[in-house]
Amino acid sequence: MQELFLSPDLVIRILLGFAVGALIGLERQKRMRDDHSLGVRTFGLHSLLGCLAAYSFTISGNALVLIYATAVSLIILAAQVFYKLFRTMRKGMTTTIVFALSFVLGALVGLDSVPVAPNIIGPLQLLSMTISFMVFLVLGFKEELASAVAMVERDELISAAELGVIILFLWPLIPQSVQIGPIEFPIFQIYILVVILLSISFANYILVKKYKDKGTYFFGLFGGFANSEATVSSLTDFHCRTGRKHPDRIALSSMFANLAMVIRNAALILLIDPTIAILRFYAVPVIILVGLGLIRGLMVRRSNIIEEKEEEEEIDTTKISPFEFSAALRFAVVFTGVSLISLFLQEFFSDAGIILAAIVGGFASAGAVVAVAAIAFSSGTIVLSTAVFAVIIATTMSVLNKIIYVFATDRDPVLAKKVAMDSLTLAAGVVIYLLVLASGLIHIV
């Protein structure tokens, strides 16, 4: 019997075929200067043309419609280029390039195979959607991206390019794992995590450098996402260079760095263990730390210690720069070293080893311990309770190590006492939660 309705796969394919182009056209339409500009309808229909032509080829095996659609697309592109260059005398080819790209994205949607249940979209369709969204972001935040690039100095840009080349060069050369004595070290997974964390550092460095004149709080928060220890050291150095005028402000900024570190670790856990088994229990200390941090901020504001006027002198951002190769290398070595030590302790001392690694390694790199614990749980080598205790203990140690970093930079006890009070208060709340978990009042299952 003849079907009267389209299959769900075909309906989704048609909708996606239009949407991947229309999303790009939405951004282009915002920048329209006249009625002849390309917009949502033109981009959407152009990508739908590619989708239908490609789908007809996959169904019939006849490339005639696909060739015809490609020829029509090329004619439209040629006409658009001619009109723009010789009639309007405008410069730039961005609209032409993304218009051509919309046809390709639609064709990817049409060429994809029927997804296997329970998936509702195929890999090529997902790729097309991802690229469409990425292009939308790049075009939509043009001024912001240009401003961010302007913040980067020439030497930093060269260092970033060198680091990117090294990362891309190493990618295909690194094996999935290496055997080191009795343990199998997941070197490629550690490598991916280092690349991800360096990327996070890159993004937050741009934010910190762009808005560092907005105040120490912004610096502490976004710098903490990149490297909380380096951020607190920079804040303390800034405190010393400005005559130690506002210790409460610097202490609160250091707390923000701790809170950012905690949130980053939560994101790292979710990335490695998408089942959220660990995150269910880690969310409680996150809430405790963020809640206590907000209370501390309100107390400082109510006591009128915080002044509205920001410091005229800028904070030195070089200590948290991820561009310099030596800084990136030190970060990678520390992260890998802590990960390796954690795995050895786990091998020789079983579950107790990962807890010991969390206590010791948390002072150097909580992110490394959190990553190792999450990887070990995902691979089934440790139980959930051990992973939960390890990530919480490592985070607590990282909160407490700020006391050491402050005292090492500024021997004056005023700031160190305030940071110590804040860090101990945060840590105390988490320790109480750990005791509740250890007592069995909350079952880790």
Image (cartoon, grey):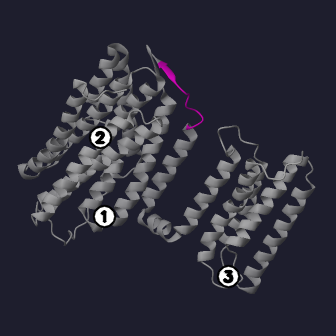
**Given contact means CB atoms under 8 Å apart, are the residues at marks 1 and 2 in contact?**
no
Q: Which residue is mark 2?
A: 284
Q: Which residue is mark 3?
A: 90
- Asked which quadrant contains residue 375, the reply is top left
Residue in view at x 46 percent, y 33 percent: 190
Q: Quadrant of the C terminus?
A: top left
Callout 2 crowding tier (Cα within 10 Å): few <14, some 14–19, many ≥20: some
- Asked which quadrant contains residue 52, the reply is bottom right
Judge from the rendering whether residue 177 lies leftward or rightward of residue 278; answer left or right.
right
Judge from the rendering whether residue 210 lies leftward or rightward of residue 402; answer left or right.
right
Q: Amino acid at mark 1?
A: Lys
Magenta residue span: 171-179
| 105 lies above or below 193 | below
Q: Which residue is mark 1?
A: 212
| 289 lies above or below 388 | below
Q: Which mark is residue 294?
A: none
Residue 434, given in percent of the width and then of the height, sits at: 23, 31
Q: Amino acid at mark 2?
A: Val
**Given contact means CB atoms under 8 Å apart, are the residues at marks 2 and 3 in contact?**
no
- Residue 116 lies in the magenta stretch: no
Label 1 and label 2: CA atoms lie apart by 31 Å
Residue in view at x 65 percent, y 74 percent: 92
Residue nearer the viewer, 59 or 62: 59
Label 1 sits on a secondary structure element that is helix
Residue 295, given in percent of the width and then of the height, sits at: 18, 54
Label 3 and label 1: CA atoms lie apart by 37 Å
Numbered-mark total: 3
Residue in view at x 52 percent, y 25 percent: 177
